[in-house]
Image (cartoon, helix red, strand yellow):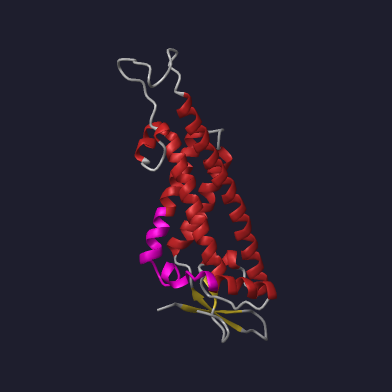
Amino acid sequence: MTAMTEAATPGPNASTIHTIRVWDPLVRVFHWGLVAAFSLAWLTADEVQPVHELAGYTVAGLVAFRVVWGLVGGRYARFARFLASPRRTLAYLGDMRRGTERRYIGHNPAGAAMIVALLVTLSGTALTGWLMDEPARLAMASDLPRVVAPAWADDDGDGDDGDEDGHAPAEHSEADGLLKEVHETLATLMLVLAALHVGGVVLASVRHHENLARAMVTGEKRAPGPDDIA
């Protein structure tokens, strides 16, 4: 059952505003924890590597939690509750363009698509960062070309795993460079998606006269009206 509370505005003409609890504490901790962890990872990239790696592992852990919570969490946290088909999402975007979109108590179709995009991009960013952290891990990626196999010298020093100066093979260096490029591209894409997400939150807040950022702090939103989708 969804909790409902009342908030009264002071004064002789006080009105009662009904609110409902939408975002559970774990969803809110995930949301703001992810903001903090990704921001820290971005700011410390190539500068403070131990902090960058710790922030990256935190991001990966939060993403894993959100996937699990999306399957077993509360009403508005479950993927089955808010994920929409591409056709429905496009229809909603068309309504947004015309300024006729309906208010959703949980995630609207555009917001749901953004969540999927963010989780997929974050997963790719974390995975590529994890692979870069230890070359031997590349051997576990069976779908990668053989040339990106881990580079470590044989005990007998036969030269296949490096030159006489101990340098890694050129193929491995190229693979590392490609992996780093993919990692950085995904991180940049995350910034673009985050900017679009913030823009969508601001637009929805203005259109529906509701502070969605504050709702993600308090967990409460205005109770659904006759035309809203709960």
Q: Residue at x 67, y 73 (%)?
A: 207
Compared with 118, 98 (above or below) is below
Q: Residue 171, percent across and down?
A: 46, 28
Asked whether residue 120 is drawn in magenta, I would say no
Left or right: where 203 falls relative to 82: right
Asked whether residue 83 is drawn in magenta, I would say yes
Q: Residue at x 48, y 55 (%)?
A: 119
Q: Residue at x 59, y 74 (%)?
A: 91
Question: Could you tell me which quadrant the N terminus lies in?
Answer: bottom left
Q: Residue 157, percent across and down?
A: 34, 15
> Looking at the image, which is closer to me, 96 or 14?
96
Compared with 37, 66 (above or below) is below
Residue sitting at the far left: 156
Left or right: where 74 falls relative to 214: left
Q: Residue 199, percent across and down?
A: 65, 61
Compared with 151, 216 (above or below) is below
**Prevailing SS of the magenta stretch:** helix
Q: Residue at x 64, y 73 (%)?
A: 94
Magenta segment: 64-87
> Looking at the image, which is closer to me, 33 or 45?
45
